[in-house]
Amino acid sequence: MKTVAVFYGGESVEHDVSVITGVMTMNAVDKARYEVLPVYAAKNGTFYTGDELFEIDGYKNLDFKKLKKAAFLPGDDTMYVIKGKTLRPLKKISVAINCTHGERGEDGCIAAICKLSHVPIASPGVSPSAISMEKHLSKTVLRGMGVKTLPSVKINTASGAASALKKAGLDFPLIVKPDRGGSSVGISLAKDERELSAAVSLALKFGESAEIEPYAEEFTEINCAAYKNADGVTVVSECEKPFKKGALLSFEDKYVDGERQFPAKIAPALGERVQKITRKVYDELGFEGIVRIDYMIIRGEVYLNEINAVPGSLAYYLFCKTQKSFSSLLTGVIEGAMRRAAPSDTYVKNISTGILDGLKGKGAKRLER
Amino acid sequence: MKTVAVFYGGESVEHDVSVITGVMTMNAVDKARYEVLPVYAAKNGTFYTGDELFEIDGYKNLDFKKLKKAAFLPGDDTMYVIKGKTLRPLKKISVAINCTHGERGEDGCIAAICKLSHVPIASPGVSPSAISMEKHLSKTVLRGMGVKTLPSVKINTASGAASALKKAGLDFPLIVKPDRGGSSVGISLAKDERELSAAVSLALKFGESAEIEPYAEEFTEINCAAYKNADGVTVVSECEKPFKKGALLSFEDKYVDGERQFPAKIAPALGERVQKITRKVYDELGFEGIVRIDYMIIRGEVYLNEINAVPGSLAYYLFCKTQKSFSSLLTGVIEGAMRRAAPSDTYVKNISTGILDGLKGKGAKRLER
């Protein structure tokens, strides 16, 4: 039976949300087809595995002594466990699913270790993950693709904000966000310079850069997800409309009291426009796995707000109209990822350069200092 | 004394070139300041370390039995060595330098394992590395930044080429390249449909996508490099003009018989334009380490052709007018990377969500299937 490694947890502020996504996903994987191996990244970054990790109740007080330290090695698709000074092969991994949210996980790091270990991943690869993690970079890429986003400036110091905003022609009210990360953590509204200073200070507690955008008084938030199925066809979900309580969609709105209208009651033409952009972005950035894209509709215009490379709960609920279950959805993305990874083993990796043989000839010049 | 881990080799077609870059770099690091630990990725992806690796002559017939298997573990900045079933800590790593070229190295994978292990890297991070590895994606990002590049299409099958080219308004003669990778491997010129078909087939031997651009009969190639010094200031090199022998700059031109004019004899205003774009791209994409950017000058217009996140020989020769030696250049990038990585330990990583405690309340809904 093939083994699916599910990565989750991690060092980011979104650790707890990721535990929920990870445990849900592990429990949803079809056990008649696959064996599941939990790979839980603790808050200090260490990987653990163990049967205890399937139970969500256990995370309140995890007993790390009952768990096993786990590791991938480069060039080797085996998951190892470490006990003291002993390294023991545990299981050959056929495919991985990334359920980490935020830094050192969703940002391309998990995709990278899977790539180094030759393990296909039923989740976004290194480059789309890395791009989606950075709000400002995402907008640059989207602009290059002809996809509309709100204007913004990225700053590294509170003192740099005023001049950068002026240069970009942006005025109050403004939204200030940490440039990296998600789940609405560290985001605030600034209606004047005093609030801006506080908002930037808050955002810079979470990372080295802050992203500042104009605040739209009235807008509709619309989310839409996509995945690539076993046959390589990109499937786009219907749209949902999440509800918010305060001026901004807060962490609690997103994960604790999350309520939504699904499918969103919006004009069909608007929904189709959102779906068309979702498909374009998913395909052109070369995504794998389930991705959720969040939009803002402002006076009828569609602005792409954020790409979630690893959305909470893997956004499975957005496919409930077309998929029998989360399990069958996962089977599709898992099978597709394995199928599409196969040809990469046949690409040319070796060419005979003769460089290392001929170093006493001309090539050796480069070794002189 | 601080230990610098130098990563090089790897599974890409550029393995041999990377060995040269790696060995040069290891020998150039100032031994009065730092200890150097070689981390050689063999052609199968396994990491090795050992004193034998400092000698370039040894790579013709490497005796792997004399080397030690090496590994980083997530959340741990120690380099371990593996002997049979035993895992032994070898050395705490203070900083890493990435000298891998191509897939599973220069593409963000080495940056990612360093990030997971909390090791600062004096080389580009995950996202600028991943972007620079893909020719088409790089152009999309650059377009979003307002930097001029040649138009292009990216295709995954030979049969898709004709219609994609027509849609983009591109005509013969064309250049066909593997979308990922560098060192001019797999690149060819297509003057008609028959040649196009062969060129695409060749490019698709190296990866899943090919990038097709118009071929400029007459152009000047100009390269320019940049790095961030210990104080965080971006230093841009003078321009060089590499020479080519055939219609395209070949692998041999680049690495075997490489000759160049340095500084390039070009109009000062043109050189300044190239330097200005180099600085903008380096800063806006958030690079660290030494990066070389290659341009084509066509009828006076500057087109950015390619960003090399890990250039051959780390492009040290482009700084020979301003730096005493490759050693002093490396000291600057190493010290800067360590200094700039330090604050990231102070960012908020934990927030109290209460989600995992309150699962019997509202949050638990998400765990139902």
Image (tube, coloured by chain):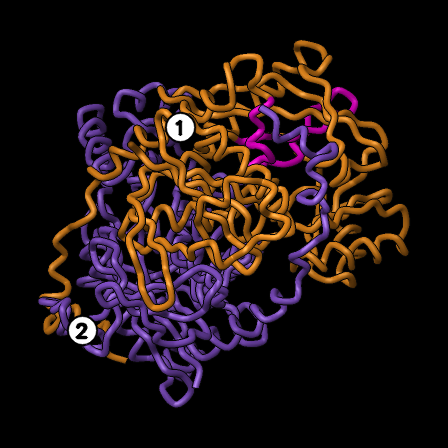
Chain colours: A purple, B orange
**Magenta stretch: residue B297 in it?**
yes
What amino acid type should be assigned to the residue bearing mark 1?
Answer: Lys
Rendered position, A47 above or below B243: below
Where residue A50 sits in the image (x, y, percent)? 23, 75
Where residue A305 sits in the image (x, y, percent)? 40, 47
Asked whether the viewer can see residue A153, the reply is: yes
Asked whether the viewer can see residue A303, the reply is: no
Where residue A160 sits in the image (x, y, percent)? 31, 21
How dense is the environment of label 1, judged by Cα within 10 Å: few (below 14), some, or many (20 and up)? few
**Magenta stretch: residue B168 in it?**
no
| Of A328 and A294, the residue lying toward us | A328
**Disc number placed over residue A56 in the picture, else none:** 2
Q: Which residues are magenta?
A: B291-317
Rendered position, B222 above or below B137: above
**Disc 2 chain ID:** A
**Disc number placed over residue B31 in the picture, else none:** 1
**B335 sits left or right of A275 in the view:** left
Q: Are marks 1 and 2 on the same chain?
A: no
Residue at 24% over, 42% down: A187
The answer to whether marks 1 and 2 mark residues whose Cβ atoms lie closer than 8 Å is no
Eye-nearest disc, 1 or 2: 1
